[in-house]
Structure formats: structure tokens, C-alpha cells
Image: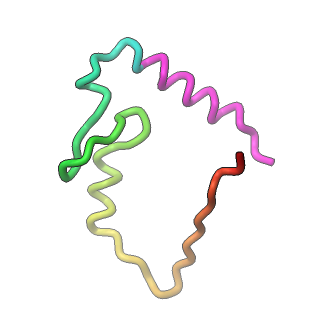
Amino acid sequence: MADKSKFIEYIDDALEKSKETALSRLFFTYQGIPYPVTMCTSETFQAMDTFEARSDDIVLASYPKC
């Protein structure tokens, strides 16, 4: 099982930083939809605009185990 401590540390750090930030700076809007700046970047969404899947690509999807 993967080490969860780095992820938890990342989330805790993001939450601490967000406490010091004005609410209007915690989100950015991309194509009219607000996204949290602590988890997403506009560059990622811009890259998706030009992304092209190939026929030999494999897509993995999962659901968190609770």
C-alpha cells in the first residue's frame, strides 16, 4: 500500500495556506467554472484543450476505498 503521509502532508499544507488567503484568491475560473487553486492549475486545463488520445492509450480509473 502506498505511503499516505506525503498526501496528507500536502493536504494539510494546502489547508494552512488557504487560511491566510482571501476567499477570492482561493479559486480561479476556467471556462466559467471555479476551481480551487490549491489542487488545480489553469495550465493543466489549457493542456487538456490540445490533448489527443491515441488508439493504443490505456485509461485507468479508480474510486477511493472508504
Query: Hey, which quadrant is residue 5 in on the image?
Result: top right
Q: Is residue 62 left or right of residue 4?
A: left
- Identify the magenta region: 1-17
Q: How many marks?
A: 0
Estimate the x, y position of residue 27 in percent, counting from the top left.
29, 33
Q: Main secondary structure of the magenta part?
A: helix
**Residue at coordinates 52% horizontally, 79% vertically from top-left?**
57
Q: Residue furthest front?
A: 66
Q: Quadrant of the C terminus?
A: top right
Q: Is residue 14 left or right of residue 12?
A: left
Looking at the picture, tell me which residue is in the foreground, 33 or 45: 33
Relative to residue 5, is residue 31 depicted above or below? below
Estimate the x, y position of residue 48 in percent, counting from the top left.
33, 62
Q: Residue furthest right?
A: 1
Q: Is residue 12 left or right of residue 29?
A: right
Estimate the x, y position of residue 34 in percent, counting from the top left.
27, 41
15 part of magenta stretch: yes
Relative to residue 24, is residue 38 depicted above or below? below
Relative to residue 56, is residue 33 depicted above or below? above
Estimate the x, y position of residue 19 in percent, counting from the top left.
41, 14
44 part of magenta stretch: no
**Residue at coordinates 38% horizontally, 42% vertically from top-left?**
40
**Residue at coordinates 47% horizontally, 87% vertically from top-left?**
55
